[in-house]
């Protein structure tokens, strides 16, 4: 599967900070994912790291001077910005941020940013006193007004042996912001609520009932929805996955906690996707003390948990799109159709949980996607690609509804 960065013209502006060495790794990753990376280094950036490093990693000559006598005909100071699909300024020093905020055009990087009409992402990296100074904060505010995306630096120990905000963020977080910047924004305006992972139903302080859900499918849905422009809330059971960048996560343990969290967020959501594997039952009694061997009986009394999705189907708001999942071991189509109807869903993704390459724990999936009009067996592929195909159908359903109602959401 081709990366979303493949074929994109990405300009990376490197300025004079010790964090420049980290950006060398980012450039290498972008080039490996087949982006066309053009690196511009300011004069002070060259004090920290040799241009040769960026040239070797990007596979392209590094740009520095505004008027290059050898390549004068290319008008680099305009061409680089004009042809860019994305401009990333990283690390961005307080000085570069101030010059961008003032609209200066006295070097190749600032002229390129002024000439660009592509998204501009700025990653500040500096001593925390400099970062927190009102002048820098004002300048960052101005950049945001221009529509640039300015990332919040990470906090921690810095090269100057001081602690505080000012560190360059990690690639995993930056990558998501950049992917969003180069992805078609067809979910803009959608407020998406996703549930993911298993629930845990406690027997006593040491034990619980749960299932094999890893949360990978729900998290892939959250990541891809954010990339496509949605505002994303994720209600997640206990999983070993980090919260995707840009996504607001509420962590829960039990089905009843998931029910409470979803009920709070559902009204405001325009699309709800219930990818979580919710336990249908919980132990009738949750013991405060650990149950001892000699006390335990051979049978466990269970109580029914609320069917959250069923309830959402009953209370569905006008225009809301409700997507369910079905974990099935046989009769996929019939079971999917039944759940689509009884839970009042707009779309259902049916999973075969008895295959090694679909369903629980694995990185791939193959889904039977059913709505009221059609039924499509999606190809067996990675969970992120599967997530994108589910969003494609949601976008289509939204368009159809808007056409039927004559526009407007
Ligand atoms: N679901 C839910 N609340 C529950 C059980 C399930 O919201 N208490 C949701 C799941 O998140 C999923 C869908 O319902 O989107 C179907 O889940 P599944 O476990 O396949 O079906 P069930 O409704 O539990 O039915 P059954 O176990 O009989 O197949």
Image (cartoon, rainbow, N blue to C red):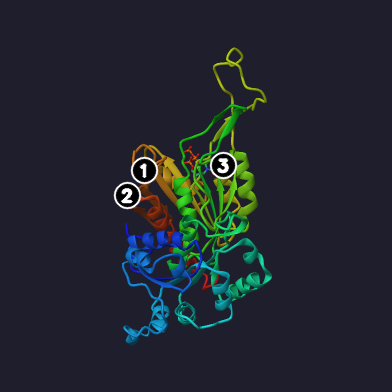
- Label 1 or label 3, whichever lies nearer to me, is 1
Count up the numbered dots. Answer: 3
Q: Identify the secondary structure beneath mark 2.
A: loop
- Per the model, the C-alpha gap separating discs 1 and 2 is 8 Å
Labels 2 and 3: the sequence-earlier one:
3
Residue 160 figure quarter: bottom right
Q: Is residue 19 above or below residue 72?
A: above
Residue 351 figure quarter: top left
Labels 1 and 2: the sequence-earlier one:
1
Identify the residue under disc 3: 307
Identify the residue under disc 2: 380
Of residue 16 and residue 291, the one placed in the foreground of this image is 16
Labels 1 and 3: the sequence-earlier one:
3
Q: Is residue 372 above or below residue 326?
A: below
* Residue 358: image tag: 1
Residue at left 61%, top 20%? Answer: 291
Query: Residue furthest toward the bottom?
Result: 73
Residue 28 figure quarter: bottom left
> Dot 1: within a 10 Å radius of its alpha carbon, few (fewer than 14), some, or many (20 or more) residues?
many
**Quick check: 210 left or right of 315?**
left
Q: Is residue 397 visible?
A: no
Image position, residue 373 (x, y; %): 40, 58
Mark 3: is the Cβ under 8 angstroms from ligand 1? Answer: yes
Q: Identify the secondary structure beneath mark 3.
A: loop
Q: Quadrant of the C terminus?
A: bottom right
């Amino acid at each position: 599967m081709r990366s979303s960065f493949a074929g994109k013209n990405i300009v990376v502006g490197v300025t004079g900070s010790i964090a420049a060495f980290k950006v060398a790794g980012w450039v290498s990753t972008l080039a490996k994912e087949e982006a066309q990376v053009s690196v511009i280094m300011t004069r002070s950036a060259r004090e920290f790291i040799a241009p040769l490093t960026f040239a070797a990693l990007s596979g392209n000559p590094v740009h520095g001077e505004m008027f290059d006598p050898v390549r004068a005909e290319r008008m680099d100071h305009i061409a680089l910005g004009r042809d860019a699909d994305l401009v990333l300024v990283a690390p961005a020093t307080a000085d570069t941020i101030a010059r961008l905020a003032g609209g200066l055009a006295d070097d190749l990087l600032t002229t390129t940013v002024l000439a660009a009409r592509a998204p501009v992402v700025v990653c500040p990296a500096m001593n925390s006193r400099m970062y927190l100074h009102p002048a820098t904060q004002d300048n960052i505010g101005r950049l945001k007004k221009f529509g640039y995306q300015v990332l919040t630096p990470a906090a921690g120990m810095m090269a100057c042996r001081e602690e505080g905000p000012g560190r360059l963020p990690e690639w995993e977080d930056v990558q998501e912001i950049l992917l969003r910047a180069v992805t078609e924004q067809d979910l803009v305006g959608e407020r998406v609520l996703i549930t993911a992972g298993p629930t845990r139903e406690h027997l006593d302080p040491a034990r619980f009932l749960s299932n094999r859900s890893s949360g990978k499918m729900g998290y892939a849905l959250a990541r891809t929805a954010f990339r496509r422009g949605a505002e994303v809330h994720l209600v997640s059971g206990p999983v070993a996955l980090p919260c995707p960048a840009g996504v607001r996560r509420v962590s829960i343990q039990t089905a009843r906690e998931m029910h409470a969290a979803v009920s709070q967020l559902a009204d405001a959501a325009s699309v709800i996707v219930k990818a979580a594997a919710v336990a249908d039952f919980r132990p009738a009694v949750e013991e405060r003390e650990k149950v001892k061997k000699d006390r335990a009986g051979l049978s466990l009394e269970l109580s029914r948990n609320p069917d959250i999705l069923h309830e959402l189907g009953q209370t569905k708001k006008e225009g809301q799109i409700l997507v369910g999942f079905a974990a099935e071991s046989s009769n996929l189509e019939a079971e999917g159709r039944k759940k689509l109807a009884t839970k009042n869903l707009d779309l259902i993704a049916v999973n075969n949980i008895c295959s090694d390459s679909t369903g629980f724990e694995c990185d791939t999936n193959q889904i039977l996607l059913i709505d009221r009009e059609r039924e499509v067996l999606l190809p067996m592929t990675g969970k992120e690609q599967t997530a994108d195909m589910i969003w494609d159908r949601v976008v289509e359903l939204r368009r159809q509804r808007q056409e039927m109602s004559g526009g407007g959401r």
